[in-house]
Image: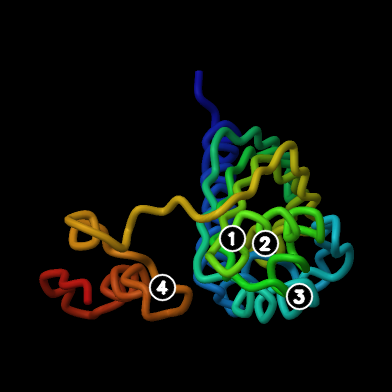
Amino acid sequence: MITNHDMQITIDRAEIQNVLARYCRGIDRLDEELLKAVYHPDANDDHGVFNGNAYEFIEMVLPLLKDITSGGSHMLFQSQIDVVGDRAAAETYFLAYQRMRGGRSKIEDYYGPTYAAAATKVGTIDEDHEYIAGGRYVDQLTRRNGEWRIQARIVMNEWGQCGPIRNVTDEGMIQHNIRLGSTDRSDPVYGAFAWLREPALPDMVIA
């Protein structure tokens, strides 16, 4: 028999999954406002290279990504979410992709001198490069004033690989068949969701 408690747990898990998904949109669109709405103001984020206040992490990482990347995509897979009252713990598997701008200084800073030297030797140092990583988000979330947000996050990178860009989006027919996303609020997703707030809900047209 399904109880009211069971129903509430299902609702809580769905709300938490939306929180986790909004992080992916925020980091891929470089949207500071959206990212900060994912965390409580006093939340902690441990990304390895940074371990501290989540808002400070956001303010540090967004200018960096704007400088060294030209696009990215964070994807979520299975998620184990346990809820007890106004607290929850979640383990969520992810795959992350970043397209890195070329150039000796950027490639060496991000990938290290050994990789940069190898890329220089084969003549790819000035091309775009890509980084693909898989891992887990280990999150503790709390509900305050009826809203779930992340209280603490640890990012566990299980594997990663890098190399010259292999994206096939700039030649031939595929150039016309694929629409690339934007790393800001000009991305069509913002228009799609803003449509829901239109009072008359006209036929949807995504710019």
- The alpha-carbon separation of the residues under discs 1 and 3 comes to 39 Å
Residue at the right extreme of this rendering: 51
Q: Identify the residue at horizontal 65%, vertical 33% (top origin).
A: 80
Give the residue at mark 2: 120
Q: Earlier in the sequence, mark 2 or mark 4?
A: 2
Q: Earlier in the sequence, mark 4 or mark 1?
A: 1
Q: CA–CA distance between discs 2 and 4?
A: 29 Å
What residue do we see at 65% from left, 58% from top? 148
Vertical placement of residue 137 versus 39, above or below: above
Verify CB contact (< 8 Å) between mark 3 and mark 2: no
For marks 3 and 2, give the one nearer the viewer: 2
Q: Residues within 10 Å of mark 4 (few under 14, many from 20)?
A: some
Name the residue at 50% across, 18% down.
1
Residue for badge 1? 123
SS category of the residue bearing label 4 = loop
In the rendered image, which residue does mark 4 sit on?
Answer: 182
Q: Is residue 5 above or below residue 100?
A: above
Q: Which residue is mark 3?
A: 55
Q: Quadrant of residue 130?
A: bottom right
CB atoms at circles 2 and 1 under 8 Å apart?
Answer: yes
Nearer the viewer's eye, disc 1 or disc 3? 1
Where's residue 54, x and y in %? 78, 69
* The furthest residue to the left: 203
Which quadrant of the figure has residue 43?
A: bottom right
Specify the amino acid type for callout 1. Answer: Gly
**First in sequence: mark 4 or mark 3?**
3
